[in-house]
Amino acid sequence: EPEVTQTPSHQVTQMGQEVILRCVPISNHLYFYWYRQILGQKVEFLVSFYNNEISEKSEIFDDQFSVERPDGSNFTLKIRSTKLEDSAMYFCASHVETDQPQHFGDGTRLSIL
Amino acid sequence: SQQGEEDPQALSIQEGENATMNCSYKTSINNLQWYRQNSGRGLVHLILIRSNEREKHSGRLRVTLDTSKKSSSLLITASRAADTASYFCAATGNQFYFGTGTSLTVIP
């Protein structure tokens, strides 16, 4: 069964540095998402992406964050200048239509030092 | 906010017993979904119930939805040790809001 893949599985970065988290959604999916889960807390919606543009974003998704689908397969989340509080698991998800279940990757654990 | 909120936060039961988790949300939804998360892994979709449905079954899972009370429940029957995980409801409107989750422990 096709799956959503995320790389790297763990990223350690110094505060203030830029990070790019990568995701390869399932190939025939059209809607893409990034979520964040701080350790021990709930999964928080960051952004949704459709037709090469952001369709919705949460208040967490400020100017430090950006998303891109540069080549039709990868879907990336960039954090420009990381803060300590950006430490979390970041999950990518995709689905074919908005009323269908989302398929999640296994996440990238981001640790900011 | 359309956030889902589950209760209880933690539930511990013996293998073979049934586990019931509840979810409440705040505004109108298109559908409500339940996901499972094993420690350190991504979320796995379990079941989706649309806003015009009241009950849905899938194997040992039974989900109900009461849109007048803005609540849903997930029942896992005849629980197994492998069901040990966190369970989240997700209220789906324009965005996708996950609840805080119920941590289920099934004791063999």
Image (cartoon, grey):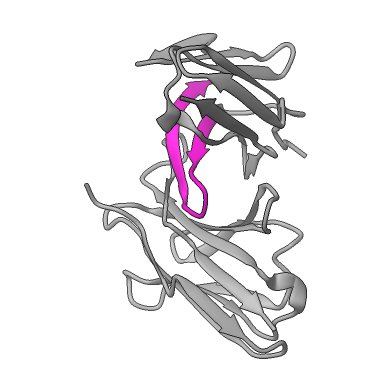
**Residue with the most extreme left position:** A1
Is B18 rendered above or below residue A85? above
Please say whether residue B69 is one of the residues in the magenta stretch.
Answer: no
Q: In the picture shown, does residue A54 fall above or below B67?
A: below
Tell me: residue A6, above or below residue A95. Answer: below
Look at the image and give the residue range highlighted in magenta.
B33-51
Q: Is residue B26 left or right of residue A22?
A: right
Secondary structure mainly formed by the magenta segment: strand
In the image: residue A105, left or right of residue B34: left
Viewer-proximal residue, B79 or B88?
A: B79
Find residue A106 and report its image quarter: bottom left
Residue B22 is situated, as x and y percent measured from the top left of the image, at 66, 20
- Residue at left 52%, top 80%? A20
Residue B18 screen position, x and y as percent: 52, 12
Left or right of A22 on screen, residue B28: right
Residue at 54% x, 9% y: name it. Answer: B54
At which x and y percent is residue B88? 59, 35
Q: Nearer the viewer, residue A104 or B8?
A: B8
Q: Residue furthest front?
A: B108
- Determine if the magenta segment contains residue B46: yes
| Residue drawn at (67%, 57%) of the image | A39
Residue B27 percent location from the top left of the image: 74, 29
Which image quadrant: the N terminus of chain B? top right
Q: Residue at x 35, y 16 (%)?
A: B59
